[in-house]
């Protein structure tokens, strides 16, 4: 591995000396364009609650999963299932209520089927990650009451590069799991051709946990939490003044372990449920845009994706259940010129077709053909001080399981929002939406034991469409001496679908259901149930400049977020994040930046029926990076992070494995990135 890393760095330096490109500048962007919305909104001129990660900030926060990368953003947590899996949880919502996209199209994997299934969307080479809530989520699907996470990269270039070749090389090392990652990106073009190549390799051993975790692990490491992944992408585009058309292919291999559900070190008497997941995916994408195709249209955008996904669940190194999803997704968007009283607008259609199967001992869902068709539109109205946005989506979903009757649903969703610009710096945002979500195949038809999640899952084929009414009030303040974003929200959900621990256990030896069992061969039973529910919460982010000198600027940031979820009968909704708040101090200069961040998570006392509470914790993180030029055309970024410096025993209430798989203990990550 060391020879491999040395050769990669040497290759980077050779290319730097031969090619020219303007190096990256360290710029703090106060206002950014939202790429995920085709209406050219900016963060200061939209009623949407939106979070954007890009530039050096994204490089510092990038991790092995999308959830871990976003976990410090307002209202977002990571539903870890060991370090190999980190699903984003937004405002207490996860799974199908949070759509994770790759350049505007779905990941087309099976991550929504079970919390132990990793998302195939990688954030390492993302140019930016956008998290959307509100009306714009209707562009990408119904029922995303949590939000939409769009991972944007340049695998299909939309414009010609400024130089013949440019790129980046990156090396990282993490002490907590001896994690090593190597990555490269190369881009270039000539004439009408633009091209892109990228790849990465990541390897780690079992993760170090806190000394106070009190688990019987070898060397205080979480057994079976090691992982290895590699990926490669190639893409190209033909670009001219009238638009572009491009194609890409990506292949991903990811092999990761699922920590033991009993939380103890495996030995000769307790090794029958060592579960690993061996994932392979090949994805083909096409993207095109035609400028001014019609007199009333600014542009026509088309996106197609075909995905061949498969993962094998290995039990004690023996192949068990095979999950596969062969899927196709398409989107067409027509961006309108101003018409009637609308200033901007987009109308579009989206289709999804997939063949989903689970074959083997734990085939908890039937082989199913899943098809959907959706029509959507979002329109803007602008006045001197007010901006309105209206959105609507109508969708039809069919699920045809083998040996069972076809099930179909027709979710209809709409939303409206208003932005009142009180001054050039201050604004008030109000959003209302009514969204419907059709139940997923696992919620309808699951029936069986799943060792990876240590559960026996039972679906309900009689589930109805879930209907959510959401209202949100936001305040945005942007002055030189004070910046703040405050969001208050309330969601009322009719027929909310949840996975509830019913208090029973499934005994694998007798293949029977028991009311009480403490043996290793007994697994809790979870039922898919529907009941009216209510959520309320807030997100606060305040930035106060403290000191400005010729050597840089010291800023302080105060943050907090909270969500409370209850069923109509008063029971708590399980796996909700607790109240979190804290403070960050950051010193920023033209070439370097350093931060110290303290987060307090309170105890989760509202864990839900038959669920366990989680203790509160303090999380202390520090980070620093330094950018400098090594030639006229190349930069080096050095970065280092210290994570969980207090070595706290951290158990996330949103995790299914919170009792047996704590989060990482004290560790440090460091790296170098060469850009040219």
Image (spheres, helix red, strand yellow):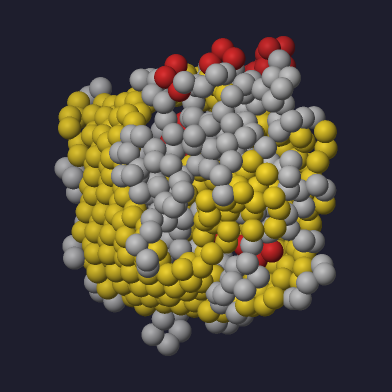
Residue drawn at point x = 24 percent, y = 49 percent: 484
User: Residue at position x 45%, y 23% from top?
Assistant: 213
> Does 674 appear above or below 129?
above
Q: Is residue 389 visible?
A: no
Q: Residue 447's spot in the image, x, y percent?
A: 70, 58
User: Relative to 174, is 111 above or below?
Assistant: below
Which sits in the foreground, 675 or 277?
277
Task: Work out which quarter of the rendered image holds the N terminus and state it.
Answer: top right
Q: Quadrant of residue 318?
A: top right
| Residue 409 image offset from top left, x and y in percent | 62, 77
Q: Toward the viewer: 104 or 311?
A: 311
On the picture, is 487 further left or further right than 36?
left
Identify the image quadrant of residue 350: bottom right
Task: Please state, as top left, top right, bottom left or bottom right, where the C terminus lies in the image.
Answer: top right
Q: Position of residue 522 (x, y in %)?
A: 64, 41
Q: Is residue 301 rendered to the left or right of residue 195?
A: left
The answer to whether any part of residue 403 appears in the image is: yes
In the rendered image, residue 126, in percent from the top left (x then y), is placed at 57, 42
Number of callouts: 0
What is the quadrant of residue 351 in the picture? bottom right
Q: Identify the residue at horizontal 73%, vertical 48% (top origin).
A: 511
């Amino acid at each position: 591995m060391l020879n491999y890393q040395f050769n990669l760095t040497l290759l980077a330096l050779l290319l730097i000396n031969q090619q020219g490109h303007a190096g990256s500048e360290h710029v703090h962007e106060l206002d950014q364009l939202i790429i995920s919305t085709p209406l050219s909104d900016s963060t200061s001129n939209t009623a949407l609650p939106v979070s954007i990660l890009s530039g050096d900030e994204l490089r510092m926060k990038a991790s092995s999963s999308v959830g871990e990368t976003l976990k410090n953003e307002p209202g977002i947590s990571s539903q870890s299932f060991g370090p190999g899996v980190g699903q984003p949880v937004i405002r207490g919502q996860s799974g199908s209520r949070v759509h994770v996209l790759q350049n505007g199209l779905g990941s087309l994997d099976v991550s929504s089927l079970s919390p132990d299934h990793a998302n195939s969307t990688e954030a390492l080479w993302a140019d930016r990650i956008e998290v959307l809530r509100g009306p714009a989520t209707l562009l990408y699907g119904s029922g995303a009451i949590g939000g939409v996470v769009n991972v944007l990269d340049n695998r299909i270039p939309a414009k010609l590069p400024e130089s013949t070749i440019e790129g980046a090389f990156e090396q990282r090392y993490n002490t907590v799991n001896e994690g090593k990652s190597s990555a490269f990106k190369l881009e270039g073009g000539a004439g009408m051709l633009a091209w892109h190549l990228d790849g990465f390799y990541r390897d780690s051993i079992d993760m170090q946990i806190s000394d106070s975790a009190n688990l019987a692990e070898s060397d205080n490491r979480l057994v079976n939490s090691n992982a290895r992944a590699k990926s490669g992408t190639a893409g190209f585009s033909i670009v001219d003044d009238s638009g572009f058309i491009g194609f890409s292919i990506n292949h991903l291999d990811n092999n990761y372990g699922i920590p033991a559900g009993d939380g103890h070190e495996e030995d000769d008497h307790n090794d029958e449920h060592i579960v690993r997941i061996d994932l392979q995916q090949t994805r083909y994408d096409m993207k095109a845009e035609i400028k001014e195709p019609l007199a009333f249209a600014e542009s026509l955008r088309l996106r197609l994706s075909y995905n061949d996904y498969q993962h094998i669940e290995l039990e004690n190194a023996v192949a068990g259940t095979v999950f596969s999803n062969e899927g196709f997704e398409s989107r067409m968007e027509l961006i309108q010129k101003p018409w009637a009283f609308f200033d901007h607008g987009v109308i579009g259609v989206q289709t999804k077709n997939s063949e989903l199967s689970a074959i083997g001992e734990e085939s908890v869902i039937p082989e199913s053909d899943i098809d959907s068709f959706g029509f959507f539109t979002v329109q803007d109205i602008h006045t001197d001080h007010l901006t309105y946005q209206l959105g609507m989506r109508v969708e039809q979903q069919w699920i045809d399981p083998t040996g069972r009757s076809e099930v179909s649903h027709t979710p209809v969703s709409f939303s409206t929002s208003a932005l009142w610009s009180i001054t050039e710096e201050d604004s008030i945002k109000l959003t209302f939406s009514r969204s419907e979500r059709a139940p997923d195949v696992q919620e309808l038809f699951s029936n069986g034991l799943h060792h990876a999640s240590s559960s026996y899952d039972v679906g309900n084929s009689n589930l109805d469409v879930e209907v959510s009414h959401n209202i949100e009030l936001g305040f945005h303040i942007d002055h030189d001496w004070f910046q703040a974003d405050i969001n208050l929200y309330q969601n009322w959900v009719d027929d909310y679908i949840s996975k509830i621990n019913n208090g029973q256990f499934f005994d694998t030896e007798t293949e029977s259901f028991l009311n009480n069992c403490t043996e290793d061969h007994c697994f809790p039973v979870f039922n898919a149930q529907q009941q009216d529910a209510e959520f309320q919460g807030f997100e606060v982010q305040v930035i106060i400049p403290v000191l400005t000198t010729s050597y840089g600027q010291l800023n302080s940031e105060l943050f907090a977020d909270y969500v409370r979820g209850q069923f109509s009968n008063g029971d708590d909704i399980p796996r909700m994040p607790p109240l979190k708040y804290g403070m960050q101090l950051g010193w920023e200069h033209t070439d370097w930046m350093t931060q110290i961040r303290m987060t307090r998570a309170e105890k989760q006392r509202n864990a839900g029926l038959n669920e366990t509470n989680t203790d509160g914790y303090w999380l202390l993180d520090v980070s620093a990076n330094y950018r400098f030029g090594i030639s006229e055309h190349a930069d080096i970024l050095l970065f280092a992070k210290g994570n969980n410096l207090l070595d706290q025993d951290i158990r996330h209430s949103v995790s299914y494995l919170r009792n047996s798989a704590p989060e990482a203990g004290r560790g440090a990550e460091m790296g170098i990135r060469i850009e040219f």
